[in-house]
Image (tube, rainbow, N blue to C red):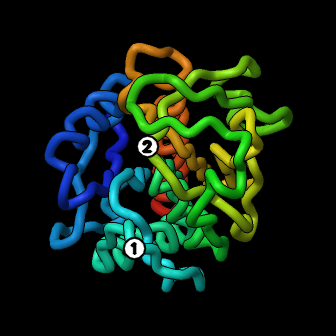
Amino acid sequence: MTRPAIGVTTSARSGWRIFPLVALNIWLAGGKARRWGAGRPADVAAVDGIIIGGGDDISPDLYGGDLVASARLDPERDALERRLVDEAMTQHKPVLGICRGSQMLNIALGGTLDQDAYATYSDSRFVKTILPRKTVQVLPDTRLIGIAGPEEMKVNALHTQAVDQLGEGLRVAARDTGGMIQAIERLRDPFALGVQWHPEHLIYAHRQRAIFRALVAAARAGMHSEDQVEAATQSAA
């Protein structure tokens, strides 16, 4: 069976060490990864799905926020990823956003970020580790609950910002115990899911691997749809 190709955006700073881990998760889920980033070719039409990866902060210019002194920005990456999300929606390609990627998914669809999320959600436990130290509650009647199940999840966290106002066509899929948004998803196809944590670091957890399997399954379904359209076109000719 042909493995769906998944384009993966990475940080110029940390992509060299994160991409192999994401690629392994994709491979175990049945896909194959292609690394994208600023200065690298990135063509949505050439892949079956995309992952917007973690890393740098997103410029507040994209959503009308204020620049904070601690922000590490990469405007070239911002422009690339916003374009990729737009094109993925137009081309009906599935998207998984990881941490920054979840935030970019929201912004590309017209949403905003809370730049000091732990001040807003003072009951949310502040952790900054790749270890599963944060409790997340998956909301009922969501796509995520069908992927990962209804039980509370222990996840990691490296962020200080979070989704604030939702982008068009999105809903909240999970919150932490203090109410902060931890996952968002698109209400209709194409598949689009954003998680604020880093499932690539939790490769030993079957519920986290299921997130990558869901993306690859959506990408494979899209491949089959394209094959059926092509076959129908050839038959008509």
Depth order, front residue of 18/143:
18
- Give the foreground label among 1 and 2: 1
Image x and y of residue 188, in percent: 74, 55
Residue at 32% over, 46% down: 5
Viewer-nearest residue: 102 or 130: 130
Residue 147 in the image, given as x and y percentages of width and height = 64, 28
Kind of residue at badge 2:
Leu
Near mark 1 (Cα within 10 A), the count class, few <14, some 14-19 or many ≥20, is few
- Res 115 visible: yes
Among numbered discs 1 and 2, the one appearing first in the sequence: 1
Secondary element at tag 2? loop
| Quadrant in which residue 2 is drawn | top left
Compared to residue 183, the image places residue 7 above or below, namely below
* Element class at badge 1: loop
> Which of the labelled discs sits on residue 158, or is there none?
2
223 over 149 or under it: above or below: below
Between the residue at mark 1 and the residue at mark 2, the CA separation in whole angstroms equals 18 Å
Residue extending farthest to the right is 141
Query: Residue shown at 41%/51% (left/top)?
Result: 51
Percent coordinates x, y for residue 10 in the rendering:
27, 55
* Residue bearing mark 1: 69
Looking at the image, can residue 232 be seen?
no
Image quarter in which the N terminus is found: top left
- Disc 1 marks a residue whose amino acid type is Ala
Q: 58 left or right of 139?
A: left
In the drawing, does residue 34 fall left or right of residue 132? Answer: left
